[in-house]
Amino acid sequence: MSGLLVVVGTGIKALGHMTLDARAWLASADEVHYLTTDPITESAIRELQPAATSLTRFYEVGRARHDTYEAMTQTLLAGTRAGRTVCAAFYGHPGVFVYPSHDAIRRARAEGLRAIMEPGVSAEDCLFADLGLDPAVVGCAQYEATDFLVYGRRPDPSAALIVWQIGAVGDLAWNPGRTNADNVRVLVDALAVTYGHDHVVVVYEAATLPTCLPMILHLRLADLALAPLSTASTLFVPPRERRTPDAQMIARLGLDGRRFGLGSPP
Ligand SMILES: C[S@@+](CC[C@H](N)C(=O)[O-])C[C@H]1O[C@@H](n2cnc3c(N)ncnc32)[C@H](O)[C@@H]1O
């Protein structure tokens, strides 16, 4: 039988977010590799699979993240090519802002190997719960901070916006705890074009330990560079304005305009 690569997520909050699916794969795989951010999740994985190895060994301060990810992908592919069932566990959802998980699956499949991903609880899921945001109501766009700047993304001021990895904006290497305030100011300037410097935004960090509360810091966009940012910080930008419903479209869809705050149909 050819090898199988199974990528699972351990969630954001230790223990409580680890799904039964993830546990089952971690316990039954021939080999397990993991990338977690807290010791409780790490010991839970090692209880299920004592020989599990951490992928954090590939991180080196200043090393380009792309090189680190390539080393992780090669590790996951090696066991799969050898015919083993390899389980790779990443914190949060393993397919949300995680390059090596998607890359390893893509490359395994291209080589004719079997590869699947099980979903997990992401920081975005926690944000929806903690900030009371239902993306169905105003819509929600999300970008990685450096991508947002480099590709000149244009946010919709009537929708919610989530910006990931603000603590590492403009940094393609791994430098934990070294947020570049100048780069944060560049992000502020770019966002201010749409929202203005006085718009109130949220620096958000979901709780990672059971019974702990999230960190929810409201501040003016202009003050973002002064905020204590970490590798776990995510920026939430609430909408600045409401959209006006399109009366022609409402009519074309055969809908009642009163449902959208317009007058009754003729
Ligand atoms: C490499 S991504 C990993 C995301 C993860 N796979 C997920 O599903 O949430 C790292 C980014 O996720 C976000 N993040 C990670 N942990 C977080 C937390 N506890 N609270 C809020 N955002 C978090 C931050 O934007 C951080 O820079």
Image (cartoon, rainbow, N blue to C red):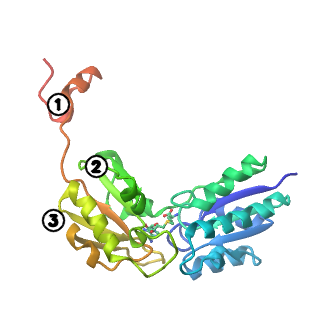
Q: Residue furthest top?
A: 266
Instruction: Write down the residue under mark 2.
Output: 159
Q: CA separation, marks 2 and 3?
A: 17 Å
Please tell me which residue is depicted at 66% across the width and 59% down the height of the picture: 7
Residue 137 picture location, percent across and down: 29, 46
Mark found first going from the N terminus, 1 or 2: 2
Instruction: Write down the residue under mark 1.
Output: 258
Mark found first going from the N terminus, 2 or 3: 2
Amino acid at circle 2: Ala
Label 1, residues with CA under 10 Å away: few <14, some 14-19, many ≥20: few
Q: Residue furthest right?
A: 1
Quarter of the image with the C terminus in it: top left
Amino acid at circle 1: Arg
Q: Quadrant of residue 224?
A: bottom left
Residue 258 picture location, percent across and down: 17, 30
Is residue 20 at all visible to an observer of this figure? Answer: no
Instruction: Write down the residue under mark 3.
Output: 198
Q: Please state if 243 lies on the left or on the right of 43 as rendered.
A: left
